[in-house]
């Protein structure tokens, strides 16, 4: 596994995350995924959304997301032990796929995080657990 220190430097000239190698993308994605899981488990909406793109934050229904944090056993019990499944490149975004588990429910879920660049910084354009 790579670390955030291995991530490519953001110079503001990178326009398309799909141009990065798999290793460079996972160096960006994995710490972001870890943070999403921790924030979800803690119900910390501000931390959960801090790396979201402007349009994603703008389009979120804060009441619905708040209810998800408060009422969803799954989103409050995600195991921090996940498996990276792969990358899908499309347009100016990369979908990063993870196998996730719950500390309270049996089974496995598919985690999805869509990454791209916004104002020269890597941002989350979508995140979900299926």
Image (cartoon, helix red, strand yellow):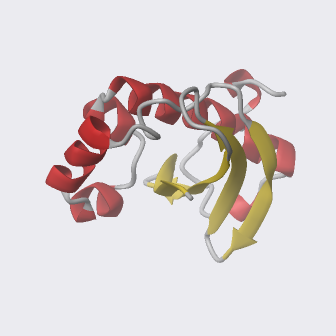
- The residue located at (59%, 43%) in the rendering is 11
Which one is in front, 100 or 87? 100
Q: Is residue 124 above or below residue 103?
A: below
- Please report the residue visible at 64 percent of the width from the left and 77 percent of the height from the top: 91
Determine the residue positioned at 42% across, 41% down.
51
Q: Could you say which quadrant of the image residue 104 lies in?
A: top right
| Horizontal relation, residue 13 to residue 59: left or right | right
What residue sits 81% from the left and 50% below the top? 85
Q: Is residue 85 above or below residue 42?
A: below
Residue toward you, 78 or 90: 78
- Residue furthest to the front in view is 106
Residue 119 % position (x, y): 43, 54
Across and down, in percent, residue 69 comes to: 30, 39
Q: Tell whether 16 sits left or right of 41.
A: right
User: Quadrant of the image for the C terminus?
Assistant: bottom right
Q: Quadrant of residue 72?
A: top left
How many marks on residues? Answer: 0
Q: Position of residue 116 (x, y in %)?
A: 56, 58
Task: Say above or below: 38 vs 48.
Answer: above
Say whether residue 1 is left or right of residue 99: right
Percent position (x, y) of residue 49? 34, 41
Q: Quadrant of the N terminus?
A: top right
């Amino acid at each position: 596994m790579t670390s955030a220190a291995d991530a490519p430097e953001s110079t503001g000239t990178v326009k398309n995350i799909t141009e990065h190698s798999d290793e460079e993308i996972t160096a960006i994605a994995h710490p972001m995924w870890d943070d999403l899981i921790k924030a979800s488990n803690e119900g910390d909406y501000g931390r959960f959304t801090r790396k979201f793109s402007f349009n994603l934050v703008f389009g979120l229904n804060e009441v619905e997301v708040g209810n998800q944090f408060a009422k969803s056993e799954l989103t409050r019990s995600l195991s921090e032990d996940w498996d990276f499944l792969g990358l899908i490149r499309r347009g100016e975004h990369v979908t990063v796929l993870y196998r996730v588990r719950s500390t309270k429910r049996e089974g496995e879920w598919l985690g999805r995080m869509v990454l791209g660049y916004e104002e020269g910084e890597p941002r989350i354009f979508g995140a979900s657990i299926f």
